[in-house]
Image (cartoon, coloured by chain):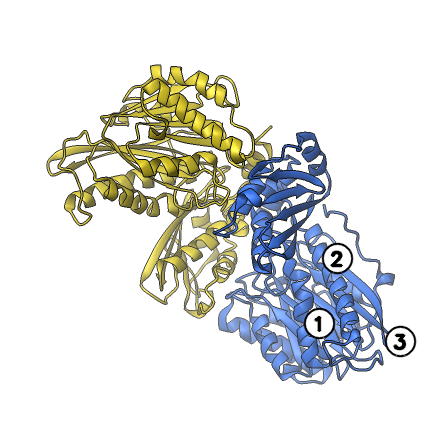
Chain colours: A blue, B yellow
Amino acid sequence: MPVNLKPPVAAELLPVAGVALGIAQAGIRKANRRDLLLIRLDEGAAVAGVFTQNRFCAAPVTVCREHLQAGAIRALVVNTGIANAGTGEPGMQSARATCAAAARLLGCTPAQVLPFSTGVIMEPLPVERIEAGLPASVADLREDNWAAAAEAIMTTDTLPKAASRKVSLGGTAVTVTGIAKGAGMIRPNMATMLGFVATDAAVAPALLRRLVREAADASFNCVTVDGDTSTNDSFVLIASGKAGNAPIADASSADYAALRQAVTAVAGELAQAIVRDGEGATKFMTIEVRGGRDAAECKAVGYAIAHSPLVKTAFFASDPNLGRILAAIGNAGIADLDVSQVKLWLDEVLVSENGGRASSYREEDGARVMKQAEIAVRVDLARGATQATVWTCDFSYDYVKINADYRS
Amino acid sequence: MPVNLKPPVAAELLPVAGVALGIAQAGIRKANRRDLLLIRLDEGAAVAGVFTQNRFCAAPVTVCREHLQAGAIRALVVNTGIANAGTGEPGMQSARATCAAAARLLGCTPAQVLPFSTGVIMEPLPVERIEAGLPASVADLREDNWAAAAEAIMTTDTLPKAASRKVSLGGTAVTVTGIAKGAGMIRPNMATMLGFVATDAAVAPALLRRLVREAADASFNCVTVDGDTSTNDSFVLIASGKAGNAPIADASSADYAALRQAVTAVAGELAQAIVRDGEGATKFMTIEVRGGRDAAECKAVGYAIAHSPLVKTAFFASDPNLGRILAAIGNAGIADLDVSQVKLWLDEVLVSENGGRASSYREEDGARVMKQAEIAVRVDLARGATQATVWTCDFSYDYVKINADYRS
């Protein structure tokens, strides 16, 4: 039951010139479901990506990193069902075979294709099914196919996730559209399970590499469902250059700032959608930590709260058992934290100060906020001027059910 | 439903000369339950403790640290129901008032009393109920009261936890007996929720401080239920000196080694009992990590596996979805880990090598081990000669239920 999340409306997802998407049913793990997405890029597109920091990263992640170094990317192939992670050297061969199959159909080289996989870990990728399914994806290629593409990359997601923005750069209208998937094993460290955002803006490749990092840090790198960083996290930003704007090459330009805002807005909406549709989620929490000495300690406190099973189950129960949040703050690893200075609010309700419960706090105020579907947890560490935000969801019976049943 | 854990048999818990225990029903949070324990020590006992690293540590933990520095401890007072954590300066006053009340009854100074609390965080301690209950605890003081004491410190525990050993030191029989509680908010960092072990051996105070750390590192500091380090973790070791052994003052002596083995055995049994009775536990896992460059990285891998909600739910489901364990290893923060060298076994079944599934692995072998109530997860990092062990349990519907319902 996703929290305040609606399926994207196909007509509201703006096509990006130079970016076509085709979907097929390849039967990779289950029959009769869209599980193979091909994204074809016109010549001249710039592509940049950020990937998981998990040491057991998937074979396609390793291949993506290689191919992005060479540049001149012409296609992305995405399959669901099997993650092709924990698959050793045979997994690398399967990822390369996927690229080769797409390259043959599109008339480019295998190094111009990026492969992506999501699904069960440590099972072999049935690459022959991908090869057999790709011609149908090619036949389906269309620029207005984003909604179907968002569906084709789902695993335990209950709803597809997509977002669009329009922005004017020096008088030229530019489009940014993206899709993502998530649900579980979500604690992106560089990026999310799978996120793809495309714009028709012209952007210098070096600047695009900066933009994808900045956008990830302000979106996918701020969310967590269960603290488990996936083996397959990949966030890719495509700039087709078809909009006709003056190519952006200066990070201090107004055009870069405007495009960054649009890309970050799309990525942020997708990242929040992943949390809203987190496995078993019934509540959406925004954890704002301010007053830190640096962003790292603010994030550490945010994640300590967001990862505590005791905090997450209290939110599920709508129980203002808020001492658990203090315990989580105390566990964030800040050795010299003066807890007597820490303040804690739920929305606008001051819960704790001076190391204990605020004298103004009334249980009924906490109970009222805890019943809401959207809750802000605000912490002031009172030791500096930086801040950070983490988005997360609660921990319910359904999280256990979904993950106990996932393979069966 | 605790995993292979039986209630202690009162007759098997050996009294420790010089250590008397008294229990009362003080109605601290709920009526008609034993919730107040007094432990009285004869003059001359040595006491050492280790406490939580949580920055929001409870008021009694702060007072314990103060009083232990002065030494000459004569009593311990333990209440359940209210943790007296996140209670600011009023909480400190309540902890001190508890010590003063016990001191008046026993004829010692407040600084000779150690206070301990466990229960709900950020609620005020009803110190007047403790004061009213203490005379009944005094009237109940007996050296053969360990079983009732183990019961009196329970919160969400389903069974009391106690253990005893006898060891011969230079021909003198010495006893070690201890009790502990746990169940949730369990990821001890120095100690567990509450653990008390007493021996009648004579041990020099400085060496006792070393022994309590060594025993904690090999027992309570190896377990986790949910990764949440409590605000109240306390592990206290008492040496009454009544056994008549030659006082132990040399860490390299055979007597110290023998006593350390007995104390560690009692502490280890108690620590494992906490995991076996972990909230909602249906399985008990021993995670052995070897081949690390240092113990810290072995522990990091062990805890990454033990804390992953995806790994824990797979164990609950008896589903050999073992790629999740690889993902957890990859998330342990070892930046230069060569995953192609890592090996993973379930009991004796080799699951993974060369970065992927072992060619000898059969799903039915994994499924067979996953059905057991006790499972060894063995990891070889193949980069060094150190090892570490972590004990944990699975993650079930009942964990969510218990923690969603705890206060109601």
- Answer yes or no: do the residues labelled 2 and 3 have beta carbons within 8 Å? no
In this rendered view, identify the residue nearer to me: B306 or B227.
B227
Image position, residue B306 (x, y; %): 46, 50
Q: Amino acid at mark 3?
A: Gly
Query: Would you say residue B160 is visible in this rendering?
Result: yes
Instruction: Determine which residue is flagged by label 3.
Output: A171
In this rendered view, identify the residue nearer to me: A6 or A167.
A167
Which picture quadrant has residue B192? top left
Name of the residue lying farthest toward the left: B171
Give the letter of the chain under mark 3. A
Give the letter of the chain under mark 1. A
Which picture quadrant has residue A45? bottom right
Locate the C terminus of chain B by quadrant. top right
Bin the neighbour count of mark 1 within 10 Å (Cα to Cα): few under 14, some 14-19, many 20 and up.
Answer: many
Mark toward the start of the polypeptide (2 vs 1): 2
- Looking at the rendered structure, whether the residues under marks 2 and 1 are on a common chain is answered as yes
Camera-side mark, 2 or 1? 1
Numbered badge on residue B323: none
The Cα atoms of the two marked residues, 2 and 1, are separated by 19 Å
Vertical position of residue B138 compared to residue A318: above or below? above
Query: Would you say residue A229 is visible in this rendering?
Result: no
Instruction: Determine which residue is flagged by label 2.
Output: A160
- Looking at the rendered structure, whether the residues under marks 1 and 3 are on a common chain is answered as yes
- Answer yes or no: do the residues labelled 2 and 1 have beta carbons within 8 Å? no
Numbered badge on residue A237: 1
Q: Amino acid at mark 2?
A: Pro
Secondary structure beneath label 1 = strand
Vertical position of residue B64 compared to residue A207: above or below? above
Judge left or right: residue B383 versus residue B92.
left
Image position, residue B313 (x, y; %): 54, 47
